[in-house]
Amino acid sequence: MKSPAFWAAQSWMWELEEPDHFRLGKSLEEELMACLLGGYGIPSEVGLAAYEVVREAWHRRPSDVLSEKSLEALLSEPLLVVGRSVRYRFPAQKARYLSAALAGLSSLDRSLPDVAFRDCLCRLRGVGPKTASWIVRNWRGSDEVAILDVHILRAGRSLGLFAEDLEVERHYAQIERRFVDFAKDLGVRASILDSVIWMAMRQENRASRKRTNSRATAQLEMALV
């Protein structure tokens, strides 16, 4: 498993080359759309494709995105992802959450510090700590929050950073604090480190699945000989 020195070096390189590579939107509203349409159970390519469709609709006629019914119809249309037509999962649920979250966003105090603003975002329907942290990290380039997904947890546990009994659902703030302190100890930005670990671990998982599928195919071919 990769060492602290590896993560530090990768973070330094990304900060030099593309320090804001994680920002997805040109406004807080767009960042909310992108993060809420992605996340658990939604492949990143599909989430981004859905975001592009919704973003275009938002600029064309915002009422279509604020309307749960119109937004559900929009998300129910097939998406073109890497040359394939795919369906977005949970269009009704995400339409309900996103329309309500966008409507509630205007009532939040955007001048709050990063962690306090993240906690306010959690009051929006369908927005949990991870999604709220994702929005704040992306939009503000915040180094005070962390997006604690499965990749970050796996990397952190392999480094001995997170105890096995710590769970995101019950110990989000505690795990997040350890991650932020770890980034400071490495001398890197937590926002960059979070993104770098996610990209590297995701790529590693894909390569592992590809190797597994290749072995399974080879075994099947041998069995058929």
Image (cartoon, rainbow, N blue to C red):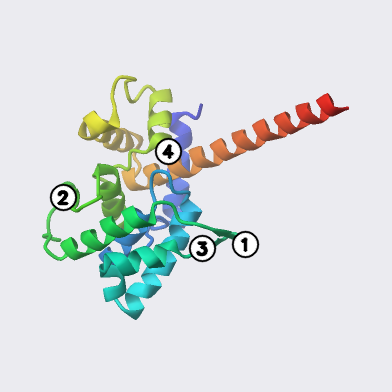
Identify which amino acid the numbered label 3 is placed on: Leu
| Circles 2 and 4 in contact, beta carbons < 8 Å | no
Marking on residue 8: 4
User: Between marks 4 and 1, how big is the CA–CA gap?
Assistant: 36 Å
Considering the image in quadrants, where does the C terminus appear?
Answer: top right
Q: Earlier in the sequence, mark 4 or mark 3?
A: 4
Q: SS at mark 2?
A: loop
**In front of the other: label 2 or label 4?**
2
Mark 1 burial class by Cα count in 10 Å: few <14, some 14-19, many 20+: few
Figure check: 115 above or below 53: above
Marking on residue 83: 1
Identify which amino acid the numbered label 2 is placed on: Arg
Q: How many marks?
A: 4
Q: Nearer the viewer, residue 6 or 47?
A: 47
The residue sitting at 50% across, 55% down in the picture is: 45
The residue sitting at 32% across, 20% down in the picture is: 163
Q: SS at mark 3?
A: strand
The residue sitting at 26% across, 32% down in the picture is: 169
User: Between marks 4 and 3, how big is the CA–CA gap?
Assistant: 37 Å
Mark 3 burial class by Cα count in 10 Å: few <14, some 14-19, many 20+: some
